[in-house]
Image (cartoon, rainbow, N blue to C red):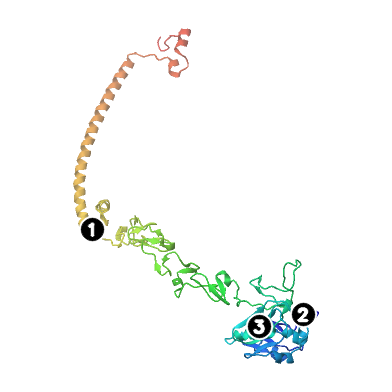
Amino acid sequence: MDTGECLGNVVSDGQRVSSAGGLQNAQFGIRRDGTLVTGYLTEEEVSDTKNPFVQLLSGVVWLIRNGSVYINESQAAECEETQETGSFSKFVNVISARTAVGHDRKGQLVFFHADGQTEQRGVNLWEMAEFLLKQDVINAINLDGGGSATFVLNGTLSSYPSDHCQDNMWRCPRSVSTVVCVHEPRCQPPDCSGHGTCVEGHCQCAGQFWRGAACNELDCGPSNCSQHGLCTETGCRCEAGWTGSNCSEACTNGSFGEDCAKKCQCQNGAACDPAQGTCTCPPGFTGDTCVQECPLGWHGPGCQKPCECEHQCPCDPQTGSCNLTRAPILSSILSQAKQCLPPSEVTLQTGELSLLTGTTWLALTLALVFLLLISTAVNVSLLLSSRAERSRHLDGAYVYHPLQEMNGELLATEKEQTGDTHNPFKD
């Protein structure tokens, strides 16, 4: 009694933390299967492992048993040393602060607390039992009372204890070794993985897509984003090339990428990859956007196939056919390589080429004759001029060109100073 330890059995969350030590006063407990137990228990019943107690506590006086007051019977059966008010009779009949625990006919847990101070205010056990009967309680035991009776709600002291604080103006709860703690069933994990709210032991998940007992599973519906996306807390996040609420719609031709937000640049009817936007060129075209025609000698999709025509002739870039259906300009170019054209086209082009060639040759001939005449006249004139020059040299009519002027050694003023005017070529 003087150690401050609990008296009686205490089982908390399945763990036995205190033993009655031979005292078998009134007990109230909850077994693993949810069964509520009220009354006197043997040590074997307390230690049962098949359906063990998850919560159990001892009291003083069995107040109500099966819907009837059971106080007198309890006084005869229980140990009065578990209370400190005085005699057992005084403990039962004195007014004081009181607490009790039990259950009603519906199986609902009931807790009772009455404020008071021994011999000054409060209720006795008879009054408390009658009050509980009126609340349809069918089984209940009395717990500690007096200065130990304290009621705390959501962390706030809600009763008026009899013990004074250091400042006598205020009342404070008495320090006790155990408390009866009542709370809603806890969720696992308590915060519902951060994606929900715990309500009576069950997680209520936030948003539309968090699922599971712990709100830790994302679920975007039976299609699971059609295997083309990732389920997030805001819904399906589609892979590039897919769209829709469940990613079941492929990008239409002309768009690609995430959410089909990008525009394809493919030309000439090329197919656009819905994911990357790359172009698959139709026969006859190549390049990143399929704007380039196949070069000569190649054909097919992406211009990947070489032509197989005779004499290495080009083929149709789309079909690969050697029977060309090209534009007239290309046909004119290829007409110079007659073996690459059909015979009928070769005959037609040859006639046109012959006519063009005759006219051209006539013009070229006349031009050459004219140039020949001009060249002849110029040559004759040069010949006559050369002969006249030679005739003057033979007559001794030489022209003096001073050496200084030819080699740049002396200036004209220098010649005047030296007075050298002698002609070295005359006797």
Query: Which residue bears the numbered disc 3?
Result: 101
Where residue 359 appears, x then y in whole percent? 19, 42
Mark 1 vs mark 2: in front:
2
Q: Earlier in the sequence, mark 1 or mark 2?
A: 2
Where residue 93 appears, x then y in whole percent? 72, 85
Direction from residue 72 to residue 197 in the image, left or right: left
Query: Which residue bears the numbered disc 2?
Result: 5
- Whether 65 is drawn above or below 290: the answer is below
Q: Earlier in the sequence, mark 3 or mark 2?
A: 2
Front-most of 177 and 310? 177
Question: Of the residues shown, which amino acid type is indicated by label 2?
Answer: Glu
Quarter of the image holding residue 381? top left
Quarter of the image holding residue 384? top left
Rendered residue at 62%/82% (across/down): 110
Label 2 Cα neighbours within 10 Å, binned few <14 / some 14-19 / many ≥20: few
- Residue 249, label in figure: none
Rendered residue at 40%/15% (across/down): 401
Rendered residue at 25%/56% (across/down): 341
Query: Which residue bears the numbered disc 1?
Result: 342
